[in-house]
């Protein structure tokens, strides 16, 4: 088994220090927040869809909503789609989300976020809210539910889009 020389041990620690700091700064890594957002249940972050029994993951819902009309990039970190002046939109230090870049109009990217409670034992806390911003037919709009995002995005960027008649469809 190869032995590590003191210089290589120091280099290894130096390279890992930013990762450890990122994990301890908020109590969880950005990668863990991104993964938790992807696997969060729609029922936990969207009250109306929860009442309808929507058990899809956020990633599954987003794939259904945008299909192959966009490129999706996942991320984690502090909430960006937050308004500290409005308590229900204040966000937290713990969010995971996605940037959605429409193929038809890459200059008008959309974003979604899942808000999480405080981490426990280095893992993201409970997912509790959904926020989004996108350019729909009326311009830039802030959204608090998946249906509003889906309709706004679909009307503008998905060919042949037809909004469901009812929220439980």
Image (cartoon, rainbow, N blue to C red):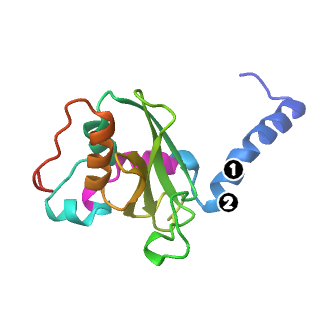
Q: Is residue 11 left or right of residue 19?
A: right
Mark 1, other Cα within 10 Å: few <14 / some 14–19 / many ≥20: some
Residue 8 colored in magenta in the image: no
Identify the residue at the far right of this view.
7
Distance Cα–Cα, label 2 vs label 1: 8 Å
Q: Residue at x 27, y 44 (%)?
A: 61
Q: Is residue 84 left or right of residue 160?
A: right
Quadrant in which the N terminus appears: top right
Question: Where's residue 166, x and y in %?
Answer: 11, 55
Q: Residue at x 51, y 71 (%)?
A: 90
Residue 35 colored in magenta in the image: yes
User: Which residue is more in the foreground, 27 or 3?
Assistant: 27
Which numbered disc covers residue 38?
Answer: none
Judging by the rendered image, the residue that carries numbered circle 1 is: 20
Inspect this view and state whether residue 106 appears: yes
Judging by the rendered image, the residue that carries numbered circle 2 is: 25
Question: Where's residue 119, x and y in %?
Answer: 51, 64
Q: Is residue 129 left or right of residue 32?
A: left
In the image, which residues are magenta?
32-43
Question: Where's residue 91, x and y in %?
Answer: 50, 67
């Amino acid at each position: 088994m190869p032995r590590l020389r003191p210089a290589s041990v120091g280099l290894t620690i130096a390279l890992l220090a930013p990762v450890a700091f990122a994990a301890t700064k908020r109590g969880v890594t950005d990668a863990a927040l991104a993964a938790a957002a992807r696997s969060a249940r729609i029922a936990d972050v969207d009250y109306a869809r929860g009442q309808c029994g929507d058990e899809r993951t956020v990633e599954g819902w987003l794939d259904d909503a945008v299909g192959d009309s966009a490129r999706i990039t996942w991320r984690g970190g502090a909430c960006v789609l937050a308004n500290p002046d409005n308590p229900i939109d204040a966000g937290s230090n713990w969010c995971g989300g996605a940037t959605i870049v429409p193929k038809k109009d890459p200059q008008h990217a959309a974003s979604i976020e899942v808000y999480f409670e405080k981490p426990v034992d280095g893992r993201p806390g409970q997912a509790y809210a959904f926020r989004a911003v996108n350019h729909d037919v009326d311009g830039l709009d802030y959204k608090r539910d998946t249906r509003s995002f889906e309709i706004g995005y679909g009307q503008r960027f998905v060919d042949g889009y037809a909004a469901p008649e009812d929220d439980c469809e």
